[in-house]
Image (spheres, grey):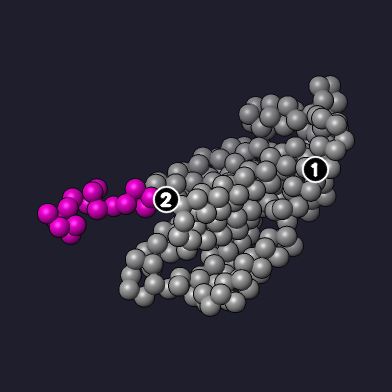
Amino acid sequence: MTRSTLPIWRRIEFTVLLAALTVGGGIWGFVELLEVARDKTAHSFDTRILLAFRTPGDPSDPIGPGWVEEAMRDLTALGSTAILLFIVVTVLLYLLLDGKRRAALFILLAVAGGQVLSSFLKLGVERPRPDLVSHMAEVYTLSFPSGHAMLSAVTYLTLGSLMAHILQRRTLKIYVLSVAVIATLLVGISRVYLGVHWPTDVLAGWCAGTAWAMLCWLIAHGLQSSRARPLD
C-alpha cells in the first residue's frame, strides 16, 4: 500500500495534527476568555490569582523580596515592542547573512501579521486594567488581551517554531522551542505579578499568540513540503 492510498488519518503527520489541534484549541480558549472579559464584574478566578501575588492584607505590596519585583520588571521588558523588534531584526539579519532570504521574508510576514492581529483584538474589548491591586509598571492601553503576553507568544513561538523547522538536529529543535516557551510564560506571569493585567488577559494573549504561531508553522510546513522549499 502506497502513501497516497493510505487512510487520511494515517497520512497526516503527528506534528501537523498536533499543531492543527493547538490552533483550534487556542481559538476556542480565546473565545471563551472573551466572554469572561466582557463581564463587567471581575471573575473570582482573576481576583484570587491577582491577590495571591500580593502580601495578605496589603494589595500594594507584591510578595517576595525587593529584587523579585525588579526581576519581574526586567522579565516583562522581554515582551516590550523595543525588545521584540530588536530580536526580530537580529534574526532577520542572521538569516539574510546566511543566504536564507525566503525564510527571512516569511518570518517578517509572520511576526508582522501577528502584531497586526494583536492590535486588532485589543480594540475589540474595552476592558479596564485591574483596580484590585496597585500597578507596578506604567500602562497606557486597555487590558484585554495582554499585548505583552500575545506579542511575546507571537514573536518567540513563531520564531522558535520556524527556526526549529529549519534546524536539522532534534536537540537544537527542542532547545529553541523550550527557550521560546519559557520566555513567553515568564513575560505573561510578570504582567500578573506587576498587577497590570488580569490573569485571563494573559491567558487570552497566550491562546491567540500560540494559535497564530502554530498556524504560521503549518503554513511553513506545507510550503516546505512542496518542491519550492521556500525556507531554504
Q: Work out whether 175 lies above or below 47.
A: below
Give the amino acid at mark 2.
Ala
- Residue sitting at x 58%, y 64%: 111
Whole-percent x and y of residue 167? 48, 61
| Res. 221 mark | none
Left or right of 182? Residue 110 is left
Disc 2 vs disc 1: which is toward the camera? 1
Relative depth, front residue between 25 and 166: 166
Whole-percent x and y of residue 13? 32, 52
Residue 8: say if magenta.
yes
**Which of the 4 image quadrants contains residue 58?**
top right
Q: Quadrant of the N terminus?
A: bottom left
Q: Secondary structure at mark 1?
A: helix
Q: Work out whether 223 lies above or below 129.
A: below
| Res. 71 mark | 1
Give the amino acid at mark 1.
Ala
Q: Secondary structure at mark 2?
A: helix
Q: CA distance from mark 2 to mark 1?
A: 33 Å
- Residue sitting at x 52%, y 74%: 100
Whole-percent x and y of residue 11? 24, 53
Give the labeled residue for mark 2. 19
Magenta: main secondary structure equals helix
Where are the magenta residues, as a range? 1-17
**Which of the 4 image quadrants contains residue 226?**
bottom left
Residue 203 shows up from this direction: yes
Whole-percent x and y of residue 54? 79, 29
- Residue sitting at x 83%, y 50%: 138
